[in-house]
Image (cartoon, rainbow, N blue to C red):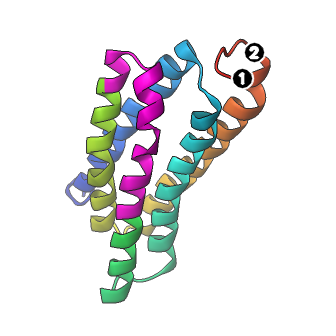
Amino acid sequence: MLRQYWPAFPFLLQMLCMAADEFWFHRKRGLPRWERIGHPLDTLTVILCLVWMLSVEPGTLTRSVYIALAVFSCLFVTKDEPVHRRYCGAAEQWLHAVLFLLHPVVLAGAAFLWLERPFLALICGLMVGFAVYQFIFWNIIWPRNKSPFR
């Protein structure tokens, strides 16, 4: 039974890496406005891919649309690199490289799980919750605290 869920393993790896990035590195350095807005948008590009998969059956056209959405998401998440270069240390940069490697693997794994709708719905729900957290914490709660990057 678990064998059919092997493509879910990259989701777990990405989740662990994102937790380290979000709860260690980001809180340690704070986020400039560009990242406070951009990171929830990164998450939304993945949610868009998952919502597409949950909304349609796999077929030639729907797979092509999914591939286009996934490629867009993979490219979109790299938009912060000029900011990261200025504000991130070597360990955080390395973690971002791992996240960039995992991103297309996660989206490919999701494609293998297209018909596992309850699993995809769970992942999508978790990602929506994470995007809401990112937006509220970094744009409403954290700016009232000590972030030097406002």
Residue at position x 33%, y 71% from top?
A: 67
Residue type at the position of mark 1: Trp
Q: Residue 145, percent across and down?
A: 75, 15
**What is the secondary structure assignment of the residue under circle 1?**
helix
Q: Which mark is residue 51?
A: none
Q: Is residue 111 left or right of residue 124?
A: left
Instruction: Tell me if I can see residue 20 in this picture.
Output: no
Residue type at the position of mark 2: Asn
Q: Is residue 65 above or below residue 72?
A: below
Q: Residue 9, percent across and down?
A: 27, 46
For the N terminus, the quadrant is bottom left
Q: Is residue 93 left or right of residue 130?
A: left
Disc 1/disc 2 C-alpha distance (Å): 5 Å
Q: Residue 140, percent across and down?
A: 77, 32
Q: Which residue is mark 2?
A: 145
Residue at position x 28%, y 34% from top?
A: 98
Q: How many dots with numbers?
A: 2
Q: Which residue is mark 1?
A: 142
Main SS type for the magenta part? helix
For the C terminus, the quadrant is top right
Where are the magenta residues, as a range?
A: 71-93
Q: Is residue 33 above or below residue 23?
A: below
